[in-house]
Image (spheres, rainbow, N blue to C red):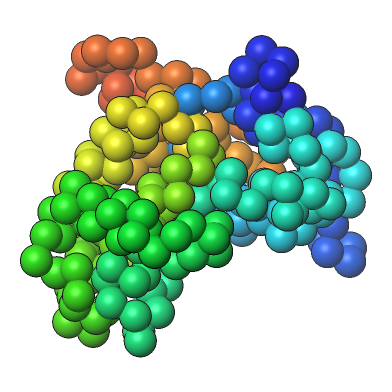
């Protein structure tokens, strides 16, 4: 699908059952190359199940999921290096320094050590962590650890970023600053990003497109906040989202 109209991620009539429980029902969704899509919904609406199907950790019960034209579950190895993930918690390895944590994905891609070091140092500097490259995670604040996690994702230069509420564990001031930096990095790099959240504020700050899900993972609203939208326009969109979520 990547070569057809620039579609990077494709869901066609996808359903996912866990026993008798339906987590995703007849979901059809296309995400194009270079888009930044915020997937918004209440806890339990199927966001994480979507995330797991995109990343190849689960296969659909029915329907079609494609990432760059490939079935991510059956072609998991073929998509190695094509998808990078930023998790809710930083998931840094405590026995590795910040630099070594950033290099982890590059090691898995068999990149030679000097090039790994060059890339990891560059991304840590870009994310404001110069001087902390050899610090271990326990010596870093929560915001700094998540910056390392973001650097690790960008270091592999994967064209697709999957983000599972990566700032929800941070205080709001730190989270707001990191959201802005993250969004700018995605825009500057031209990557495709899928950002899962349950926060309307976060979805509007991050997403060029906001997709609101109702349980079980059906699209209830799919909108693009207009560039340069006025405060009144953004508030109207916020209210529409709130109305959908309250139903």
Q: Is residue 88 visible?
A: no
The percent coordinates of residue 151 (x first, y second) are 32, 54
Circle count: 0
Point 90% across, 44% down: residue? 62
- Residue 135 horizontal side relative to residue 76, left or right: left
Q: Image quarter for residue 239?
A: top left
For the N terminus, the image quarter is top right
Q: Is residue 128 visible?
A: yes
For the C terminus, the image quarter is top right
* In this view, 169 is above or below 247: below
Point 16% across, 53% down: residue? 125
- Residue 223 horizontal side relative to residue 21, left or right: left
The percent coordinates of residue 243 (x first, y second) are 47, 33
Point 36% across, 54% down: residue? 115
- Residue 115 horizontal side relative to residue 134, left or right: right
- Residue 26 horizontal side relative to residue 9, left or right: right
* In this view, 98 is above or below 174: below
């Amino acid at each position: 699908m990547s070569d057809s109209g620039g579609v990077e991620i494709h869901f066609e009539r996808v359903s996912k059952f866990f026993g008798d429980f339906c987590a995703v029902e007849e979901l059809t969704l296309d995400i194009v190359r270079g888009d930044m899509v915020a997937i918004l919904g209440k806890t339990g609406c199927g966001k994480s199940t979507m995330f797991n199907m995109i990343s190849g950790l689960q296969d659909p019960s029915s329907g079609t999921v494609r990432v760059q034209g490939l079935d991510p579950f059956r072609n998991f190895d073929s998509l190695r290096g094509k998808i990078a993930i930023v998790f809710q918690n930083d998931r840094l390895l405590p026995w590795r320094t910040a630099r070594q944590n950033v290099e982890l994905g590059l090691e898995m891609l068999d990149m030679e050590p000097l090039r790994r070091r060059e890339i990891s140092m560059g991304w840590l500097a870009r994310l404001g962590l110069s001087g902390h490259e050899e610090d271990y995670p326990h010596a870093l604040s929560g915001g700094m650890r998540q910056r390392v996690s973001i650097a690790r994702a960008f270091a592999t230069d994967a064209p697709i970023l999957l983000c599972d509420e990566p700032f929800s564990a941070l205080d709001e001031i730190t989270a707001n600053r990191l959201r802005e930096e993250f969004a700018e990095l995605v825009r500057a790099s031209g990557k495709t990003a899928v950002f899962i959240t349950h926060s309307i504020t976060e979805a509007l700050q991050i997403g060029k497109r906001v997709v609101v899900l109702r349980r079980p993972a059906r699209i209830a609203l799919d909108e693009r906040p207009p560039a340069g939208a006025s405060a009144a326009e953004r508030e109207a969109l916020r209210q529409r989202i709130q109305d959908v979520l309250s139903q």
